[in-house]
Image (tube, coloured by chain):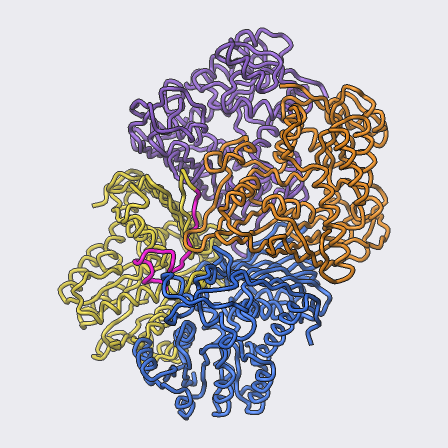
Chain colours: A blue, B orange, C purple, D yellow
Amino acid sequence: MERVKVGVIGTGFIGPAHIEALRRLGNVDVVALAERSEDLARAKAALLGVGTYYGDYGQLLKEEHIQSVHICSPNYLHYEMAKAALAAGKHVVCEKPLAIHISEAEELVELADKKGLANAVNFNIRYYPLMRQIRAMVEKGDVGEIFAVQGSYLQDWLFYPTDYNWRLEPEHAGPSRAIADIGSHWMDLIEYITGLRIKDVCADFATFHKTRKKPLRPVETYVGKVLKPEDYQDIAIHTEDYATVLLRFENDGRGVMTVNQVAAGRKNRLYFELNGSKESVAWDSESPNQIWIGKRNGNNEILMRDPSLVYPECIELIDYPGGHNEGFPDTFKQLFKEVYAFITSDRTKAPCFPTFKDGLREIILCKTILESSVNRTWIKVT
Amino acid sequence: MERVKVGVIGTGFIGPAHIEALRRLGNVDVVALAERSEDLARAKAALLGVGTYYGDYGQLLKEEHIQSVHICSPNYLHYEMAKAALAAGKHVVCEKPLAIHISEAEELVELADKKGLANAVNFNIRYYPLMRQIRAMVEKGDVGEIFAVQGSYLQDWLFYPTDYNWRLEPEHAGPSRAIADIGSHWMDLIEYITGLRIKDVCADFATFHKTRKKPLRPVETYVGKVLKPEDYQDIAIHTEDYATVLLRFENDGRGVMTVNQVAAGRKNRLYFELNGSKESVAWDSESPNQIWIGKRNGNNEILMRDPSLVYPECIELIDYPGGHNEGFPDTFKQLFKEVYAFITSDRTKAPCFPTFKDGLREIILCKTILESSVNRTWIKVT
Amino acid sequence: MERVKVGVIGTGFIGPAHIEALRRLGNVDVVALAERSEDLARAKAALLGVGTYYGDYGQLLKEEHIQSVHICSPNYLHYEMAKAALAAGKHVVCEKPLAIHISEAEELVELADKKGLANAVNFNIRYYPLMRQIRAMVEKGDVGEIFAVQGSYLQDWLFYPTDYNWRLEPEHAGPSRAIADIGSHWMDLIEYITGLRIKDVCADFATFHKTRKKPLRPVETYVGKVLKPEDYQDIAIHTEDYATVLLRFENDGRGVMTVNQVAAGRKNRLYFELNGSKESVAWDSESPNQIWIGKRNGNNEILMRDPSLVYPECIELIDYPGGHNEGFPDTFKQLFKEVYAFITSDRTKAPCFPTFKDGLREIILCKTILESSVNRTWIKVT
Amino acid sequence: MERVKVGVIGTGFIGPAHIEALRRLGNVDVVALAERSEDLARAKAALLGVGTYYGDYGQLLKEEHIQSVHICSPNYLHYEMAKAALAAGKHVVCEKPLAIHISEAEELVELADKKGLANAVNFNIRYYPLMRQIRAMVEKGDVGEIFAVQGSYLQDWLFYPTDYNWRLEPEHAGPSRAIADIGSHWMDLIEYITGLRIKDVCADFATFHKTRKKPLRPVETYVGKVLKPEDYQDIAIHTEDYATVLLRFENDGRGVMTVNQVAAGRKNRLYFELNGSKESVAWDSESPNQIWIGKRNGNNEILMRDPSLVYPECIELIDYPGGHNEGFPDTFKQLFKEVYAFITSDRTKAPCFPTFKDGLREIILCKTILESSVNRTWIKVT
């Protein structure tokens, strides 16, 4: 296998997840990381066993032997970093969202295309192996015409008004929160597995905690849960805790998605159910190694993630036998596996992983949904 | 116990369910039934072990010793029968919907009130014992402020275009189908357990099978599933197979309900999840003897229907110990138990069962939702 | 339908369950009950809406119009009451166990046979409709050769040393407790659905609470859970809280059953899994309306209790459509339905319900298991 | 972090799982692998991205810079390889079983001790994070006295007589199969989490497929499932497909374990339920990120693998937030993380991972169980 040298920018919650997944591939070396200060970069490099570190990501991009860069910084930095990385001739794997504004994302799509560089956005949920199985089932006609899709993505890490994080601040995370953070995953997944584009949306947003208490010292994502409720300041919240969106698909199929970041007891649960003209299919991310198949004239079925039971398209994403559960970290590995297979190929075949185009798509969907929510009306996705 | 003599009008799918539930009470005698012809009435009386039968419900209503009447006929007959029964001085338990038109339902509410007669609509799902437990949990503040409610009611008995039933015909069932048949149960249940009224709705309807094949001979509800696909005629379908409705509650809480009668594999599944400011609560009618309670800072919980684990309000609806599952037939028994306790009381205490007022409420909600669907816009419930 | 007049002896926890189930049949009238005193009998008759009552069951047996008797008294009385009822020419439905001693049960089998009277033991769990479906699946060869059966019956109503009931007293309940009370249900069920007889057993018993506190006033089964821990006396316990039994079936298939009445959180849960040479089948009584079917080369399946999905043998036990859950009370109804269909027939066809022979079988199994436990060795069932 | 250089011997199914887990640690370099031939070793090194390869494991052991060796070969080679590795001064992580014979395992325990080298056996199931949570719950007294433990480990990869693998051959795998392969995992886990030693066993074994068809060309574990049934030879099978073992623990608590490798539909499912004097705890490896907690006087609970909900002892094994499922591959990472933390420490603290002593323990248990099965009697574990 050709070896690829990789640099990682940003090492908060998600950067280390990228690093350990990259190491599993066997032909990728994480050679450098960058953080917002040299001290932090040095500490993280020691902790994560990465050889070289930079307090300025521009320095990392100057390293010629680094072929590929992973952008794991807060949302508002994605655009400038991705642009600089492409300009420096690096392949780019960017955390979602690709950018805050549509025009930025369009610029990145164009630039990556012009440069002929691999470009990916980390919509990792597609890489639960059974998601590819469902996509294959839909493609092969097992499910029939898609009548309806329902589902939700529920979390509770922002349940209390004392839960605080940069994701609550529009200047760091963008104007939408629940839809952009988790709704985008759900919509990317559903468009991916059904092969259908959302054409109209009608949204209802709510912000249940209109004020939150911001701690006086910074806290990393999710880790915030164990904070003590002291030394906070009051901050008015302008992004949505909750949204439900009615959807119409290009085949005139119907859909509905609920996202909620204050749903007690739901740590991080994505659910969907497809109702097709031949069968239904449902998946719950809390039991990611199985799908439910609903039948009218036969028994319902539970399909387990087992190489001997799935379509060939799905087998490629399975590294362990049936009953040996794979989970969230494995989705990163599988996505990166496909990205680096593409990078080390002649790149003439279209990539099967989510690219900057998919990143742009989600920003357009989020913006349209936000607009629908403000106007309390149906809006066409353009 | 004072004994009450009861007559039942209509003995298709649901009439026999009423009869067997009534018999379980111990102080109610089902003394007569009526059907649309004397022959059918005679046959059903023999089959069901009922002593007296009538080919004309008007005859049944003339019997002075009959104190209470159950109306189990197709929807379009409910109004006239309920009106006649009240006029004849009978207490009335009516299947849902109470009527087709709002004005009819209003008339029945008024008439029942004027006559001082017990009046009930069979929203039986409220009578799964744990529904009363959740209502008590909400009332006592365990759940906190209700932020959001999501859920669905899914069936597959109309999955194929060859599935046919009078419920598909607006002239027999009314202008709405999925919402009126099953959505009304969901909304009645949610308003009941949350104590919150729906104030705004925004609906999206779909009819996936625009034409269905009607068999040349009549078939009873549900039993239609085993029919052979022969000797049918094409009928254009104008009522909804599917609907999703965005909801706003009077406390500004949000909601969403999906109903679908062509969801393969979902035989008859009602689901909801409440997200409150203190905890979440979810229930799946396929596992009716337990509820899920979601917590942010503690373990999630599974509360089983067990007299030793629930609030006193709930114990009254439980006849069997924990682990001895009660099901759908038991909900009828419990509802009727409360109706007949009321009938045999001095009737000074407000009834705790669903009355004609609740029947009217659902007709108003359905009409508003239908209107919202036609106009593709939010509408206030008035 | 021919009408049958029935008397019920004993109205503690289980008698009322018999009465309400009988009433659902439509052709059976519960005309009388007997209790251990006239005062208690009178009170219960009023509560349960039964017309006639006796403080002495012998009086009830003298009533000529009573054709059938249900014995719902404590275990130690079953034998004498069943014998007297048969002698009086009544059909008998007896709660389990049929008797304390094998010889008594043998005598009852013989007497019933000689008298040509219907005789049943209330192994109601067989009457969850899907149990008949599994029996049919095994008979038709769907499951293949039965390799192994595992399962358990777990309860927690005797969890605390302060839980007390006559079932703890050998003089009222017999020398075995967990095995006789709940293990007998499990074994009856497994022999019924597999069609295989247990040929060898090897048991391990345990009594975790060697002393219990007996309340100074009597308490009914299950209701005891809500008692306060005061006014008790210490009683040494000699019957098993727990047992696990290794089993060998006549086809040399293997089995194992665990019973436990002090398993916190398990209110009343019977579970089994059959592993056959073609497929596996599992059932959990907490979700009685579905079975799991395990496959090696295909998807696993969930079969729901739906008349359109099961074998004809099973349809007969289903009164409600798929998704309309039936539960514990419905098993009594279905068992009695078959008993009274037999009683009102010419009785030339062998009964399909559990008879006194099945009652005898369980007493033999229990005795052998008890012996195996004492000797800590395998014993052949003779 | 100090970096450690590691060599891996054997690269069938489990060797690559070791390699990718080791790479996730960040301070361990997999520098070499050994296989049974140079050609195979070269091919695997290229596939797995390992720099150096050997067709003879003895060569690998001669490399001075290699500090630690993972033994992932077939069972019958573990002893000689582990012995040689220790003799060469390497730390050793050995796949289970540590050896075929007790005396061999004893020798290895002694040798490792004398050499002062780290020694581990890969009982990875302990490293599902919630297993450490349960251990902590037991230690802190939450569960109370352990009354009983039930459970099973079921697979179907040997379901058909055409399924074949070296694990079926006593000369390569040892005299026990189901017990040694999977029962050892269950027993190690239960002794680990309860802190209780098994003192007596009584076993029942069965071999359902007495003859199997061996393919004429070699096949790797699990992958065999997709083989065509052609070109086989008949082989008599002498090891158990199935076993159930009654257990008594040192506190006189009771237990039972069933293992079965021909249980259709169970891909690789380990289940257990502990019944304690305060609460019950259950875990199903198919849903590894949650445990069930059973209560008598309160709601049952579902504890999710979430750092904010578990004891500190458990947090150390969790790398991802609640709702971000970890699975089978993560157990290897966590086990190795503790092994290499020990290796890079001063090694004065007792290791918390399973050592050769635990490997020896399982061989003793397996041998005693095998003996019990042959004699059909209880045997004391010595």
Q: Quadrant of the N terminus of chain C?
A: top right
- Total labels: the figure holds 0
x, y percentage for residue C257? Answer: 41, 37
Can the viewer see residue D54? Answer: no
Q: Quadrant of the C terminus of chain C?
A: top left
Determine the image quadrant of residue C249: top left
Work out whether residue C151 or residue C290 is closer to the camera in this orientation and state it. C290
Q: Residue furthest front?
A: A234
* C214 shown above or below C155: above
Query: Is residue D305 highlighted in magenta?
Result: yes
In the image, residue C220 lies at what x, y percent?
45, 23
Residue B78, image x and y in percent?
79, 37
Q: Is residue B97 visible?
A: yes
Q: Residue furthest left?
A: D114
In this rendered view, identify the residue nearer to me: A353 or D94: A353
| C68 to the left or right of B172 | left
* Residue A124, above or below B21: below
Q: Measuring 72% from the left and 45% from the top, which residue is drawn there?
A: B362
The image shows residue B60 at horizontal and vertical percentages of 81, 25
Q: Which picture quadrant has residue B326? A: top right
| B36 drawn magenta | no
A202 horizontally vs D8: left or right = right
What stretch of residues is rendered in magenta?
D299-318
